[in-house]
Amino acid sequence: MEPASENKGIWKYGSQWEEELLLLKSILDKTELKETTKWGGPVYVYEKKNVLGLGGFKEYFAIWFFNGVFLKDEKKKLLNAQEDKTKSLRQWRFTSKDQVNEKEVLEYIAEAIENEKQGKIIKPSKKEAIISELLENEMSKNPALKEAFEKFSPYKQYEFLEYIESAKQEKTKLSRIEKVVPMILANVGLNDKYR
């Protein structure tokens, strides 16, 4: 363990929120979460799963719930910091100690822990299945192709389908199919050579 004085990793602005973050920590000490340090800040885990983190930012200090999307958030406290990027992380921001209501914080944390116990997580978004009629046609004419295609993992199948179907024009799709058919038959994934 490094000396505590150096462990100011509560992000860049931790020092201006020192008391506030200590207050949150004292509340967290009442839960069954274990404190660890990840990414330069305190992260609280339940059976090695990240449940929440604390941090000080320029304008506020915050608790963020790694799977906050599942919290009912009846008190409307949680924010999605980056709408388009963040699927499950939610932040609860404070600008002063007075805003920290221990009872509410503990309720949210208890719910977050319960969600972990139930194993609620967002599976990486199941990409929409892509259907390629052109490839389907090829496969119906060529059973060996179908068989070879089905040996690929769903992810690799998806890469082929996406590659074909992301072409705008029919003729490009056809030329892409010509390119991938030998790869499929040779059991070579679309991006294998880059992996």
Image (cartoon, rainbow, N blue to C red):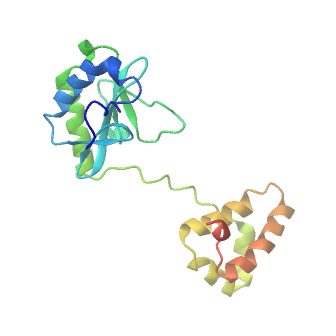
Quadrant in which residue 182 is drawn: bottom right
Residue 106 on image: x %, y %: 19, 30
Would you place residue 135 above or below residue 107 in this image?
below
Closest to the observer, 110 or 3: 3
Instruction: Farthest residue to the bottom: give it.
Output: 144
Please report the residue visible at 38 percent of the width from the left and 30 percent of the height from the top. 91
Would you place residue 116 above or below residue 59 in this image?
below
Would you place residue 133 above or below residue 64 in this image?
below
Quadrant where the N terminus sits is top left
Residue 22 on image: x %, y %: 22, 24
Image check: 33 left or right of 153?
left
Residue 149 on image: x %, y %: 63, 77
Please report the residue visible at 13 percent of the width from the left and 34 percent of the height from the top. 30
Closest to the observer, 80 or 194: 194
- The answer, for residue 138, to whether it is visible in the render is no
Would you place residue 169 above or below residue 176 in this image?
above
